[in-house]
């Protein structure tokens, strides 16, 4: 499936990042180091990552009719993404993410993000019902939770009806229906999203993760219809679990300059390799390399690697 086509239905944001040496406490003002603006949004990041890896990828989402929207379309096109069916909404703004990035004296970065959805939440399934005619073109569909849940649910149901694989990245956290869990093939939360979904903290007191707790979390979701769980664990790597397999891949050690878009890089790279015919472990290993590259570079879409970068 070398030229397998991938569909990303999701969010498109303009990221405004303020970099500082320390996050301000309540009521506190601190001096920042720099302010930057760059394309982002989970959907855009995931589509751009696949395009930069050489994948055949189509992006569907909504933008405002403004300068930010035009800039995001240009970024997608530059990464090789098909933007023909992105919706342009008059009278609303393109989504915006405000990123606070704390960088310590060793160059390690951590972020806090506020997302103002704008056009991302102002479209419905009827706006993209044209996908029903082309759904069978795709090998896998990637979804996230920065767009209306009703859109995700209907796309997932349509995909299942037509035998198309679905990856759901449940971020930012929101409750998921049993119907949605039954209609997806891969659920890829980070450990915090997994805890919100199941109430289970997979970390031990020493900071390591518990295989038993991961299995317990999976069984809770499996009982509701989930087929497979792919968990990102930051510096601890990633874990895949289904009824038959429990696979672990260690993280690649690197200086975490900016963790923005690391999860997006991992999820989309994994999905890309699955669409190309890789087995689960090979896809996880490839995605781990891509995510390691992303965290070692500044920015969201600007930090996503091309295939040559990974070589």
Image: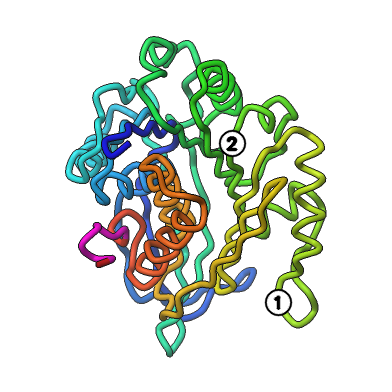
Residue 208 disc label: 1
Q: Is residue 197 left or right of residue 255?
A: right
Residue under label 2, please give it: 185
Residue 308 on the magenta span: yes
Q: Quadrant of the C terminus?
A: bottom left
Q: Under tag 2, what secondary structure? A: loop
Going from the N terminus, do you reach mark 2 or mark 1 first?
2
On screen, residue 136 above or below 239: above
Give residue 133's position: percent from left, percent from top: 38, 10
Q: Quadrant of residue 290?
A: bottom left
Residue occupying the point 70% across, 76% down: 208
The magenta segment: 304-310
Determine whether the residue tagged by mark 1 lies in a helix, strand or loop: loop
Question: Which of 271/95 is in front?
Answer: 271
Q: Position of residue 8 (x, y in %)?
A: 40, 34
Above/below status of 96 relative to 135: below
In the rendered image, the quadrant that contains the N terminus is: top left
Q: Position of residue 180 (x, y in %)?
A: 66, 28
Circles 2 and 1 in contact, beta carbons < 8 Å: no
Dot 2 surroundings within 10 Å: few (below 14), some, or many (20 or more)? some
Could you tell me residue 140's position as x and y percent? 44, 33
The magenta stretch spans residue 149: no
């Amino acid at each position: 499936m070398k030229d397998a086509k991938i569909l990303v239905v999701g969010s498109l944001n303009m990221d405004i990042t303020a970099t500082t040496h320390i996050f301000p406490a309540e009521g506190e003002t601190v001096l920042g180091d720099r302010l930057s603006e760059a394309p982002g949004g989970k959907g855009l990041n995931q589509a751009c990552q696949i395009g930069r890896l050489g994948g055949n990828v189509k992006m569907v989402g909504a933008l405002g009719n403004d300068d930010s929207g035009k800039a995001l379309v240009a970024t997608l096109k530059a990464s090789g993404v098909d933007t023909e069916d992105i919706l342009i909404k008059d009278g609303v703004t393109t989504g915006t993410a405000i990123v606070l990035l704390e960088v310590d004296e060793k160059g390690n970065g951590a972020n806090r993000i506020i997302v103002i959805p704008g056009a991302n939440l102002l479209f419905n399934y009827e706006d993209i019902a044209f996908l029903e005619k082309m759904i069978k073109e795709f090998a896998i569909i990637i979804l996230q939770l920065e767009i209306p849940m009703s859109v995700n649910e209907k796309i997932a149901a349509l995909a299942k009806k037509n035998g198309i694989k679905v990856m759901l990245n449940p971020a930012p956290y929101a409750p998921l229906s049993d119907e949605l869990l039954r209609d997806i093939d891969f659920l890829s939360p980070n450990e915090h999203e997994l805890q919100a979904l199941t109430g289970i903290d997979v970390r031990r007191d020493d900071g390591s993760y518990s295989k038993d707790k991961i299995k317990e979390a999976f069984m809770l979701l499996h009982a509701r219809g989930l087929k497979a769980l792919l968990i990102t664990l930051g510096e601890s790597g990633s874990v895949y679990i289904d009824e038959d397999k429990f696979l672990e891949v260690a993280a690649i050690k690197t200086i975490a300059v900016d963790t923005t878009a690391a999860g997006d890089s991992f999820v989309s790279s994994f999905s890309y390799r699955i669409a190309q015919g890789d087995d689960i472990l090979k896809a996880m290993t490839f995605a781990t390399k891509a995510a390691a590259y992303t965290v070692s570079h500044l920015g969201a879409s600007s930090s996503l690697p091309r295939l040559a970068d990974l070589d």
